[in-house]
Image (tube, grey):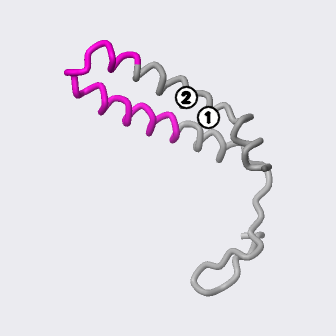
Amino acid sequence: MIAFRKIFTDTSFYALILLNIFFIYEYKDDPKNYSTIIWVFWCQSVLIGVFNFLELLTTRTVNSKGFIMNDKPVDPEK
């Protein structure tokens, strides 16, 4: 249930919904133009990447407990 609350408070969720609505509208206007579908996927990929990049920039704490690299636990000080 907590995951649903996070989804509905996430601005990227609403941005993707609005972008999909916009592109569905554009596609219905000219369905023979197949490049519309390609632009939909490209814009979504860029939007997802931008929001993930911003989330990485604004992360304050990182929990490395249980994270293993090269069969060794990760030292959080490095």
Residue at left offset 63%, top offset 39% = 54
Q: Give residue 31's position: percent from left, percent from top.
A: 25, 20
Secondary structure at badge 1 equals helix
Q: Give residue 24's position: percent from left, percent from top.
A: 40, 22
Residue at left offset 48%, top offset 22% = 21
Q: State the predominant SS element of the stretch in magenta.
A: helix
Q: Which of the pair 67/76 is nearer the observer?
A: 67
The amino acid type of the residue labelled 2 equals Ile
Q: Are marks 2 and 1 in contact (CB under 8 Å)?
A: yes
Is 40 within the magenta? yes
Q: Is residue 32 left or right of residue 70?
A: left
Circle 2 packing at 10 Å, graded few (<14), some (14-19), many (20+), is: few
Secondary structure at badge 2 equals helix
Residue located farthest toward the left when viewing the structure as drawn? 32
Q: Give residue 76's position: percent from left, percent from top.
A: 76, 70
Residue located farthest toward the top when viewing the structure as drawn? 29
Circle 1 packing at 10 Å, graded few (<14), some (14-19), many (20+), is: some
Q: Which of the pair 15/3 is nearer the observer?
A: 3
Q: Is residue 35 left or right of residue 67?
A: left
Residue at left offset 69%, top offset 36% = 10
The amino acid type of the residue labelled 1 equals Phe
Q: Is residue 42 left or right of residue 56?
A: left
Occupied quadrant, residue 42: top left
Taking 73 as reference, is 76 above or below it? above
Occupied quadrant, residue 77: bottom right
The image's mark for residue 13 is 1
Q: Give residue 59's position: percent from left, percent from top.
A: 73, 48
What is the magenta range?
25-49
Residue on which disc 2 sits: 17
The quadrant of the rendering that contains the C terminus is bottom right
Is 34 within the magenta? yes
